[in-house]
Amino acid sequence: MKNHPDDRSDNVEKIQNNIDNTVQNMEAAKEMIAVTDNDKTKKNLKEKNKRRGEALGLMKAEIQDEAKDDNKRRNN
């Protein structure tokens, strides 16, 4: 098996895509919460959105780190 070079050139784009998808999922869950009468479903969706919100914070920090690293690679 060959080792592949560490290609991080599109990490910022991938992370941004993950952020966009997470936000869309949160919005869809909010819409479901508004229309469902099932308390268990509401609770599960709210818990998922809480975890998604936490993940968003981590992804935003990660995208900043990747952007800094990308700038360093380009300037060297």
Image (cartoon, grey):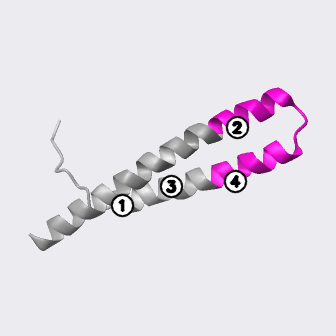
From the image, tell me which residue sits under label 1.
12
Q: Mark 4 to mark 2: distance in Å?
A: 11 Å
Residues marked 3 and 4 touching at CB (< 8 Å): no
* First reached walking from the N terminus: tag 4 or tag 1: 1
Q: Return the mark for residue 19.
A: 3
Q: Residue at x 84, y 47 (%)?
A: 34
Query: Hey, what amino acid is under mark 4?
Result: Glu
* First reached walking from the N terminus: tag 1 or tag 3: 1
* Left or right side of 16 for 43: right
Query: Hey, what amino acid is under mark 1?
Result: Val
Identify the element where label 3 is drawn: helix
Magenta-colored span: 24-48
Q: Tell me, yes or no, whether the highlighted magenta stretch contains residue 54.
A: no
Query: Hey, what amino acid is under mark 3?
Result: Ile
Q: Which of pointers 2 and 1 indicates the residue nearer the eye? A: 2
Q: Mark 4 to mark 1: distance in Å?
A: 23 Å
From the image, tell me which residue sits under label 4.
27
Q: Mark 2 to mark 3: distance in Å?
A: 18 Å
Q: Which of pointers 2 and 3 indicates the residue nearer the eye? A: 2
